[in-house]
Image: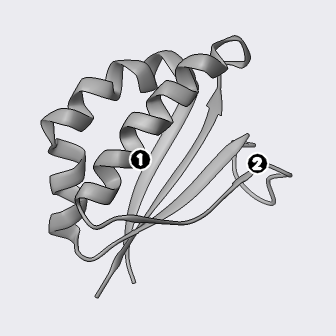
Amino acid sequence: MSVIVIVQGTPHPDRLDILKQYQGAAGAVVQKHGGQVVTRGTGVESLHGPHKWQFGIILRFPSAEAVRAWYNDPDYQKVIPLRTQAFADLEINVFQE
């Protein structure tokens, strides 16, 4: 069964160049581990909960092991500082399909 990763965040508006750097580097590592972008979008509203995220992306991986391999990959670990700089707030959750 495949695994879904939901990434929701609010980027720093003055660091969009850093966000683009992060997305390019992170996307290559996602693909390396069999991940694919299902969809992405910008926030419209929150129907329930404390956050009104400005950005969301859904990724699909072939397995939970592939998700862990992506996240722990040294190439991904190198770009986490860019992610930290780019986002004011970020949440990443994993779900079994």
Colouring mode (rainbow / by chain / secondary structure / one colour): one colour
Graded by Cα atoms within 10 Å as few (under 14), some (14 to 19) or many (20 or more), the crowding at tag 2 reads: few
Give the x, y percent position of residue 57.
Answer: 57, 55
- Mark 1 to mark 2 CA distance (whole Å): 18 Å
Residue kind at label 2, given as amino acid type = Thr
Q: What label does residue 42 carry, if any?
A: 2
Give the x, y percent position of residue 50.
Answer: 70, 43
Along the line of sight, which residue is nearer the eye, 84 or 78? Answer: 78
Graded by Cα atoms within 10 Å as few (under 14), some (14 to 19) or many (20 or more), the crowding at tag 1 reads: some
Query: Residue 78 vs residue 48: left or right?
Result: left
Residue kind at label 1, given as amino acid type = Gly
Question: On the rendered image, what quadrant is the C terminus found in?
Answer: bottom left
Q: Nearer the viewer, mark 1 or mark 2?
A: 1
Q: What label does residue 52 carry, if any?
A: none
Query: Residue 22 vs residue 65: left or right?
Result: right
Q: Residue at x 35, y 47 (%)?
A: 28
**Helix, strand or loop for disc 1:** helix
Say which label, 1 or 2, has the lower sequence index.
Answer: 1
Q: Residue at x 49, y 43 (%)?
A: 91
Along the line of sight, which residue is nearer the eye, 51 or 78? Answer: 78
Q: Furthest-bottom residue in view? A: 1
Question: On the rendered image, what quadrant is the N terminus found in?
Answer: bottom left
Q: Residue at x 73, y 18 (%)?
A: 13
Query: Residue 38 vs residue 83: left or right?
Result: right
* Snapshot quadrant of residue 35: bottom left
Count up the numbered dots. Answer: 2
Label 1 with label 2: CB-CB less than 8 Å: no
Give the x, y percent position of residue 41.
Answer: 72, 54
For disc 1, the marked residue is 27
**Helix, strand or loop for disc 2:** strand
